[in-house]
Image (cartoon, rainbow, N blue to C red):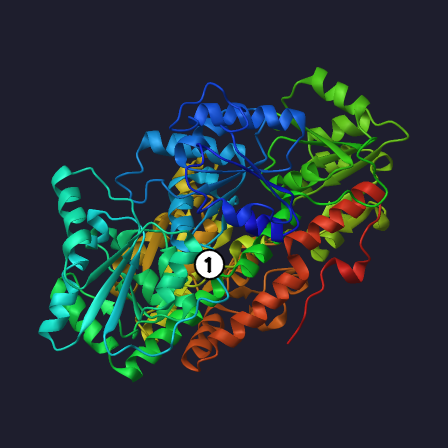
Amino acid sequence: MTQGLAAAGCEATLLLKAPVTTDRLVAPLSGAPGVTVRRTHEEGLAPEAGQRGLTPEQAVELIARLDSEDRFDLVVVRGRRLAIAASQSEQLAGRLWTYLTDVPQTVAEMNATAVSEISDVAVASRFLLCQTEELRGFLESAVPAACGKSVLFPPVVVTPDDAVGDGAPHSTLKLVYTGKFAPRWNTLEMAQLPAALAERGVPAELHMIGDKVHRDSAEWARDMSRALESTEGLVWHGGKPRADALRLSAQCDVGLSWRDPEMDASLELSTKVLELGALGLPVVVNRTPMHERLLGADYPLYAGETIDSVADTLTLAAEADIYREAAERCRAAAADFTLERAAERLSGYLELACPPAPFGTSPERPLKVVIAGHDLKFFTRLADYLTSLPGLDVRIDEWESLRNHDQYRSRELAAWADVVICEWCGPNALFYSEHKRTDQRLVVRLHRFELYAEWPRKIDIDKVDAVVCVSPYYASLTRELADWPADKVVVLPNWVDVDQLDRPKLPGAEFTLGMVGIAPSRKRLDRGVEVLGELRRRDPRFTLAVKTKQPWDYWWVWNRPEEREYYERTYRTVQRDPLLAEGVVFDPFGPDVATWLRRVGFMLSTSDDESFHLAPAECAASGGIPAVLTWPGADTIYSGRWLHDSPAEMAEAIHAVVSEDRFDAARSAAKAEITENYALRRVCDMWTDLIVHGKVPASRDAARVVTA
């Protein structure tokens, strides 16, 4: 991490927890450009710390003290206890980059206490760094606060230039294990492998590197120590500096990362597998979904649970052709985990977390911006971005409800602000237009909800500098219904966080249709069910996943007889039709959309009308395909290739894409279109131009839809 941050252009300070007793880890960083190593004990930075090292609380106190002396732009912490302690520091809030490893990784372990603790960490963190996609998905599903903040930071592989394997096995097969000695790592069982291979006519020796023996069981620790010291065919090298351990490993033939089956469900990826692969060595590993994704389902060196099964696998590794294939698989897998790749990732995250000040602003005299509204969920990411910009001082006026607010605070903010953004054209917009100064700018974002309400007719449009709509169709409709000057109504589209949504699809995603939100009835779940029925008549592998609250969760929907009758009729249709009953799955509503979308190949938009409908765009950004009925204005948001005139036509198009093996090509085109038009960074730039310079996008740039 320290090397990666330095390579990404940071001045990185590494704060050591404990006294240095060996320089194996610290030596490579001493004198490295951009790196400062602070030796806490040797420098007397924390006199209260004992010889075992800083406690998490002491570490946070020391970080805060150093931060007060010379402010850090970000603070990277690793370890659950340290992260929990750091999350309680108001001084560090918002600047924490929390590297998550020792967190619960099963539903049973993720109890209420764990969820509460990790939620606190997520709220205080700018990013949660996750080793694997599996860990990120699990966290987002269990901890809503982690959604939108979880990013990937896989293990980083750095190997010495002179550490390269021979590319072929020796006549005596040399096995190598590096790391700690612990029961679940099967290190005691590994000691029996030379003898098991000898029985199969394969001469072998086992090289083990490390000096940390787990002592949770005194008997096991005694047996492990005895095996290291006296097993025939086992060479124990003891603890070595990392670079030396890798050089020793490169002189061997096959790496061992055989673990107890209990660890197959781990959501973390072994760095040792990647390091050995980078050296050019094949590695024996357990067959797990993660390893199959990394190395392929047909990788030849998967191990079973027993010593005999591992010995049989190693017998295959002694064959030159199999050895070469396995080594190349491991080498190719490790290529995605280099320090250069880590620096690229970190550079991207740094750009998001520490953006430059917009042109024309000054951090010394920032532009004062107020964001006001009763429901800011559609503006949250934009608000986060604007708040992160040097040169802008952003304050939030969050109303209790559509009409209720703290009038004294709102008046104070109205007098303070240079620019006011009203999310929703409701009573908030009326209030701020009435209190607007002549040297102030007022921007109002109007949604479909307000267009047919009373407030647009009451507002003094002369006091408003820009009314923002999310689509050209609704901008045109707003000009017509409100009779406002055409140049006052501008289009800034909804944003799509393509970086967060860009995740690998799960196997079979092309057979899963998706819908997000089915209330009220104008969302037309019945049409989605009709599409599914058409598809399942041709191929029963198609299913429909619906991520939603139920209609009875909305009192204003369920209290209307016609709405209730509609849903009862639609649900009866699903329940009574054998073709549909096993093909529809309802998933709970929540912010973990990016994780949920991994299994969705097509997102249906079957509504009577929409102002934008974000779900198909988000699906496209995730690597899926929009499937949109031609509701009014759909053609100003999505290109014609994703639009359909009827459920039957939609089903026909979906079936053709899958059956004709065009899924990958189509989803690639959809992703490119959405990224070009609606990527979060592009939309943030448009809003920044509007807020800072009063610049509105030209109509031709408002929604650049590519037709193909």
- For the question of whether residue 202 can be seen, the reply is yes
Mark 1 crowd level (few <14, some 14–19, many ≥20, 10 Å Cα):
many
Name the side, left or right, on which 430 lies relative to 274: right
Residue at x-position 38% and y-position 70%: 330
Pick the residue in front: 154 or 672.
154
Residue at x-position 60% and y-position 38%: 74
Q: Position of residue 302 (x, y in %)?
A: 25, 68
Pick the residue in front: 83 or 116.
83
- For the question of whether residue 609 can be seen, the reply is no
Q: Position of residue 461 (x, y in %)?
A: 83, 37
Name the side, left or right, on which 318 lies relative to 2: left
Q: Quadrant of residue 575?
A: bottom left
Quarter containing the C terminus: bottom right
Q: Position of residue 399 (x, y in %)?
A: 63, 26
Task: State the residue lying farthest toward the right.
Answer: 438
Q: Secondary structure at mark 1?
A: loop
Q: Position of residue 559 (x, y in %)?
A: 43, 35
Task: State the residue lying farthest toward the top.
Answer: 408
Residue at x-position 20% and y-position 37%: 216
In the figure, 667 relative to 397: above or below?
A: below
In the figure, 463 relative to 317: above or below?
A: above
Instruction: Name the residue type under label 1.
Output: Val
In the figure, 637 relative to 681: above or below?
A: below
Judging by the rendered image, the residue that carries numbered circle 1 is: 157
